[in-house]
Image (cartoon, helix red, strand yellow):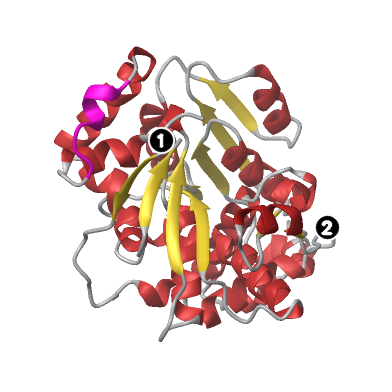
């Protein structure tokens, strides 16, 4: 097996001023919104007894999101709830009023009309936004970076969204989506990354992901696991990790689990930056040539004005990550 690189979290403890974003009440609202969809069902929490025994663990559980809304991914939870929060904000209403029945009613169409939700994606996030917009009678525009697959393009297009594959990378697709949203009446960008001046909607997306964490906590209690000792979560762009860590830190404020944020070797951005910060030395010299292009892009983000774009939500989860960040 390929060596697993890891780094112990050495970030200083903070006052957790952002932790209320993932408060139990906020996640309850997200869950109630998702439950209002006729397509909603709780996804399975698999209990891996054989693997747990082999590893010498008391229990091992995996949340299986391949069943989520028939889309094979959790991403729709974040985009759909952010859309509901945006609509509620525009109407001066509480998000608790934004049920599926109301958002698909003639009364809502008369009171609100249609918005156009812009986003950039290489797959699942854009599909989730397109699916939610389609179900709620809204519009969606999705930009995909160069190299995106036709299968993912087709999956998004089937939801009625306007989809393009651009001859630029992901970051530039985000900028394009933001620019077009700003130029479109009733247009808004729904993106699961944040930058200076664009923080509220990514926070709502994290709350949407909290539905999954809330389900898992309930499912664990049903099998008499009142508190997991460790929570493993993929890094991604940081929104999922921040959402999951934030939820469990709020759920167990006095004794939170140990959090391990993991990422794949083909997308090892965090471990690379930990090496740049001196936390995991030497990794930059071990990078394969296949990773050079993405690392050059990351270096550009790190050194330029968009530094907070990459790290904003990662700071939230990293300050609470008590064990390590690993990459295969």
Marks 2,1: beta carbons within 8 A: no
Q: Earlier in the sequence, mark 2 or mark 1?
A: 2
Residue at the farthest bottom position: 254
- Which residue: 51% across, 40% down? 119
Residue 70, compared with residue 88, is above or below; it is above
Q: How crowded is mark 2: few (under 14 residues within 10 Å), some or many (20 or more)?
A: few
**Where, by quadrant of the figure, is residue 94 drawn?**
bottom right
Residue 286 in view here: yes
- Position of residue 240 in the picture relative to residue 107 (left or right): left
Identify the secondary structure beneath mark 1: helix
**Where, by quadrant of the figure, is residue 197 drawn?**
bottom left
x and y percentages locating residue 57 in the rendered image: 61, 63
Identify the secondary structure beneath mark 2: loop
- Position of residue 269 in the picture relative to residue 113 (left or right): left
Residue nearer the viewer, 138 or 75: 75
Q: What stretch is highlighted in magenta?
A: 280-287
Residue 236 in view here: no
x and y percentages locating residue 30 in the rendered image: 61, 70
Total marks shown come to 2
x and y percentages locating residue 316 in the rendered image: 33, 62
Q: Residues within 10 Å of mark 1 (few under 14, many from 20)?
A: many
- Which residue: 46% across, 79% down? 250
Residue 174 numbered tag:
1
Residue 39 numbered tag:
2
* Mark-to-mark CA distance, 2 and 1: 29 Å
- Which residue: 51% across, 65% down? 230
**Where, by quadrant of the figure, is residue 40 drawn?**
bottom right
Tell me, yes or no, whether the highlighted magenta stretch contains residue 283: yes
- Position of residue 247 in the picture relative to residue 222 (left or right): left
Residue nearer the viewer, 215 or 102: 215
Residue nearer the viewer, 165 or 251: 251
């Amino acid at each position: 097996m390929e060596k697993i690189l890891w780094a112990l979290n050495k970030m200083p403890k903070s006052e957790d001023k952002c932790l209320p974003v993932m408060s139990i009440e906020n996640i309850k609202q997200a869950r109630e919104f998702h439950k209002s969809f006729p397509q909603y069902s709780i996804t399975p929490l698999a209990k891996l007894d054989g693997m747990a025994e082999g590893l010498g663990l008391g229990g091992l559980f995996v949340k299986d999101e391949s069943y989520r809304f028939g889309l094979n991914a959790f991403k729709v939870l974040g985009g759909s709830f952010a859309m509901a929060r945006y609509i509620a904000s525009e109407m001066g209403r509480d998000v608790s009023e934004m049920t599926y029945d109301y958002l698909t009613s003639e009364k809502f169409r008369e009171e609100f009309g249609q918005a156009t939700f812009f986003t950039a994606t290489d797959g699942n996030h854009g599909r989730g936004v397109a699916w939610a917009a389609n179900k709620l009678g809204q519009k969606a525009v999705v930009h995909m970076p160069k190299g995106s697959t036709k299968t993912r393009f087709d999956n998004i297009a089937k939801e009625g969204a306007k989809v393009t594959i651009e001859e630029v990378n992901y970051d530039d697709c985000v900028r394009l989506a933001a620019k077009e949203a700003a130029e479109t009446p009733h247009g808004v960008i729904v993106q699961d990354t944040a930058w200076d001046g664009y923080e509220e909607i990514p926070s709502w997306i994290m709350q949407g992901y909290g539905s999954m964490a809330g389900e898992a906590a309930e499912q664990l209690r049903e099998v008499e696991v009142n508190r997991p000792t460790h929570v493993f979560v993929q890094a991604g762009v940081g929104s999922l990790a921040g959402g999951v860590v934030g939820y469990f830190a709020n759920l167990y404020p006095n004794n939170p689990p140990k959090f391990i944020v993991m990422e794949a070797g083909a997308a090892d951005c965090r471990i690379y930056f930990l090496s740049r910060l001196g936390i995991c030395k030497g990794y930059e010299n071990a990078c394969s040539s296949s990773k050079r292009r993405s690392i050059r892009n990351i270096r550009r983000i790190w050194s330029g004005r968009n530094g907070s774009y990459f790290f904003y939500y990662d700071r939230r989860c990293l300050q609470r990550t008590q064990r390590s960040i690993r990459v295969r």
